[in-house]
């Protein structure tokens, strides 16, 4: 009996220790990113538009300036409400004091400068697939944007989701670097996959989630409930989605559907960003979307 | 003056229609119908602007003039209070419309201004029409982003 109790305690302690180890932060390999160039702000602008940082980090309201990343937008989820922080180059309230390496670890690994986990409401779950040099360019670009001194607001989360360490276990279970759509891809499909799966994170909205908020890879881009509670995010794969490559590319460039309805809701900022890219980039996304739906 | 007249009696509908029957309020279908008429004209020009069909100056001008007129249709009885997507089914009108009525009217007026500019040039050549068509789409989008729910 005493033995059994002792065994149980040991097991619990072991499980606890394992969980603690597994939930620790796993930053980028410093050596691998040490060789990156200082970053090219002009290329960084294209990354910024494709990755849609402004959609979440600009001020609330639909007329907000997409270059002023003062934060404050709210995101509903099953776990509570997240508030996007200030990521303008303000040294006190933004990320003005961050090094390139700290920035890369935040965006590509979801780890803060003091080694804490970020919640996956920040889609590093997609950005983990980005080229480190692209994120270094993004860093250079973002440091040229205007600073703003609005303080970041705390999230409104219930227990146990308010414990950041628990995100480490979530990452251990779900954070993946590999591509979702694999196989023989054309050059355009490959470029489109990079833009869509690594930067523009289409799936974060268009794919349904499981119990712990992880994307359901078996129903990739098949449509999802709207986190705001109203309506649905439409499917962009599967039998019900019959758009041509031209239709998709034209929609991303203009906001117009093939029936000439006009985009709205959370897709509108996506279009506002993507329409500023070269049309060839949008054609590549379209090629990927059709490929993903096969 | 147009905007004022179009919307001065904006909330009159609220007193004319009983909230108990909001589900059957015909205003919802009627305002959705007006948007279908927008698309009937806007879409023809869109198809030309995107090169899906050939540009036809006369058809483009007729569509632009139609759009000019339908976007000037008086709105005062189309948006009665209580016909938002929280209160009733069958509408994508976000309740924020009634919380920010001034901004909603401003976005409607911005669309009218963009359509007026399109109407002035739609028959004058494809590049001219394309240049004026873009801002109209943007004005529709600005309102849909803020005030139209995702479809269910």
Image: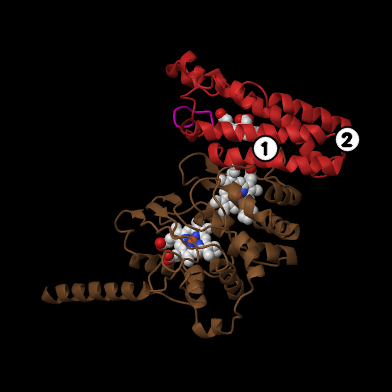
Which percent across, then down, holds residue A159?
29, 56
Kindly identify the residue that appears in the image at 50 percent across and 68 percent down: A107
Circle 1 — which element?
loop
- Tags 1 and 2 in contact by the CB under 8 Å rule? no
Q: Is residue B87 magenta?
A: yes
- Figure check: A172 above or below B15: below
Q: Dot 1 falls on which chain?
A: A
> Residue B36, how many percent across, how many down?
68, 28
Q: Locate residue B24 relative to residue B60 in the image: left or right.
A: left
Judge if badges 1 and 2 mark residues of a common chain: no
Residue at the location (63% across, 32% down)? B109
Chain letter of the residue beneath label 2 in the structure image: B
**Chain drawn red, letter?**
B
Q: Which residues are magenta?
A: B85-91
Give the drawing colour for chain A.
Answer: brown
Task: Give the residue furthest to the left.
Answer: A2
Disc 1 to disc 2, C-alpha distance: 21 Å
Which residue appears at 57% of the width and 42% of the height? Answer: B145
Q: Nearer the viewer, residue A90 or A284?
A: A90
Residue farthest along the front direction in this orientation: B1
Q: Which mark is residue A261?
A: 1
| Image mark for residue B56 | 2
């Amino acid at each position: 009996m005493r033995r059994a109790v002792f065994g149980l305690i040991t097991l619990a302690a072991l499980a606890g220790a394992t969980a603690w180890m597994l939930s620790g932060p796993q930053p980028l390999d410093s050596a691998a990113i040490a060789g990156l160039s200082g970053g090219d702000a002009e290329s960084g602008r294209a990354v910024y538009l494709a990755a849609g940082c402004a959609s979440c980090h600009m001020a609330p309201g639909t007329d907000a300036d997409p270059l002023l990343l003062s934060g404050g937008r709210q995101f509903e989820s099953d776990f509570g409400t997240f508030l996007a922080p200030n990521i303008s180059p303000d040294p006190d309230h933004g990320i003005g004091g961050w090094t390139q390496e700290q920035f890369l670890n935040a965006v590509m690994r979801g780890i803060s400068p003091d080694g804490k986990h970020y919640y996956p409401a920040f889609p590093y779950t997609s950005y983990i697939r980005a080229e480190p040099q692209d994120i270094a360019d993004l860093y250079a670009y973002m440091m040229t944007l205007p600073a703003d001194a609005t303080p970041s607001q705390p999230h409104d989360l219930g227990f146990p989701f308010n414990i950041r360490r628990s995100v480490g276990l979530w990452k251990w279970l779900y954070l993946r670097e590999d591509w979702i759509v694999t196989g023989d891809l054309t050059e355009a499909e490959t470029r489109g996959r990079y833009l869509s799966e690594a930067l523009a994170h289409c799936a974060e909205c268009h794919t349904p989630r499981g119990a712990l908020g992880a994307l359901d890879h078996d129903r990739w881009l098949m449509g999802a409930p709207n986190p705001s509670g109203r309506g649905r995010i439409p499917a962009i794969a599967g039998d019900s989605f019959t758009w041509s490559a031209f239709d998709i590319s034209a929609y991303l460039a203009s906001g117009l559907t093939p029936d000439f309805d006009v985009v709205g809701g959370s897709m509108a900022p996506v279009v506002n960003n993507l329409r500023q890219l070269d049309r060839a980039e949008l054609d590549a996304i379209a090629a990927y979307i059709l490929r993903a739906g096969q | 003056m147009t905007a004022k007249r179009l919307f001065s009696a904006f909330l009159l509908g609220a007193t004319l229609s009983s909230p108990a029957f909001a589900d059957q309020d015909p205003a919802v279908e009627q305002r959705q119908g007006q948007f279908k008429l927008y698309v009937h004209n806007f879409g023809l020009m869109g198809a030309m602007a995107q090169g899906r069909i050939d540009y036809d100056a006369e058809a483009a001008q007729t569509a632009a003039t139609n759009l000019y007129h339908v976007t000037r249709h008086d709105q005062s009885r189309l948006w009665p209070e209580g016909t938002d997507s929280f209160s009733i089914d069958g509408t994508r009108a976000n309740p924020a419309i009634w919380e920010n009525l001034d901004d909603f009217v401003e976005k409607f007026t911005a669309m009218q201004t963009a359509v007026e500019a399109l109407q002035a040039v739609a028959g004058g050549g494809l590049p001219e029409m394309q240049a004026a068509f873009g801002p109209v789409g943007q004005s529709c989008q600005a309102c849909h982003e803020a005030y139209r729910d995702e479809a269910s």
